[in-house]
């Protein structure tokens, strides 16, 4: 990782316009699940969504979300491919209305990692391997991140979000970081 620039070596870089300057030190990782259209995998729709290039005529669901301006720092596809959309030195727009340990606006101090999947399906072993590798790198570069400061989207936005879901294997993942 090139900490000064916030880009991970080996990640495919696709620069999203959906970010702004970070005001706080990075101290949290938020894990998400995403698929576009829902429960369909293997397209470049997630990339296009984060790049504001999603075509609303391609799927009825896209009409609902095509005007949203969102991003995540990272996406790990089901094949294990790692993509980065926003420098970790900047604030990606992944958490929305959120709170962690009494502090609101988690985007201000977190790194967002999207896993291609849904909150009601299993993730691939290769995704966990890439996530573990990425998490270790981030923890080395951002010492305020500890195991208890790695959470799911559902934890920081309860009632509003449910990802990464019940099938995410927290025990296995955290035992390997």
Image (cartoon, rainbow, N blue to C red):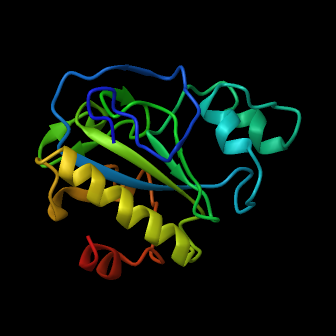
Residue 162 vertical position relative to residue 96 in the rendered view, above or below: below
Q: Furthest-right residue in view?
A: 57
Left/right placement of residue 141 relative to residue 9 reads: left
Viewer-closest of 10 and 99: 10
Q: Residue at x 43, y 31 (%)?
A: 93
Q: Position of residue 48 (x, y in %)?
A: 70, 34
Left/right placement of residue 168 relative to residue 143 reads: right
Viewer-closest of 104 and 91: 91
Instruction: Please state, as top left, top right, bottom left or bottom right, where the C terminus lies in the image.
Output: bottom left
| Count of marks, rendered view | 0
Q: Position of residue 29 (x, y in %)?
A: 29, 50
The answer, for residue 165, to whether it is visible in the render is no
Residue 160 vertical position relative to residue 130 in the rendered view, above or below: above
Q: Residue at x 31, y 34 (%)?
A: 107
Instruction: Please state, as top left, top right, bottom left or bottom right, where the N terminus lies in the image.
Output: top left
The answer, for residue 31, to whether it is visible in the render is yes
Q: Residue at x 22, y 47 (%)?
A: 28
Q: Position of residue 108 (x, y in %)?
A: 25, 30
Q: Residue at x 38, y 40 (%)?
A: 95
Q: Position of residue 113 (x, y in %)?
A: 43, 50
Viewer-closest of 14 and 114: 14
């Amino acid at each position: 990782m090139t900490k000064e620039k916030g880009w991970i070596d080996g990640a495919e870089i696709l620069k999203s316009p959906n970010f702004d300057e970070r005001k706080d030190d990075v101290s949290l990782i938020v894990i998400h699940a995403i698929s576009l259209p829902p429960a369909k995998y293997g397209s470049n729709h997630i990339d296009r969504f984060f790049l504001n290039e999603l075509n609303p005529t391609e799927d009825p669901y896209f009409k609902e979300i095509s005007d949203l301006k969102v991003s995540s720092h990272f996406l790990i596809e089901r094949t294990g491919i790692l993509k980065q959309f926003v420098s970790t030195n900047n604030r990606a727009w992944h958490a929305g209305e959120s709170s962690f340990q009494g502090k609101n606006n988690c985007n201000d101090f977190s790194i967002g990692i999207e896993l291609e999947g849904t909150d009601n399906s299993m993730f691939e072993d290769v995704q966990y391997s890439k996530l573990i590798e990425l998490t270790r790198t981030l923890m080395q570069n951002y010492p305020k991140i500890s195991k208890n400061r790695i959470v799911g989207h559902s934890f920081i936005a309860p009632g509003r979000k449910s990802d990464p879901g019940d099938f995410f294997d927290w025990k296995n993942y955290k035992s390997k970081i």
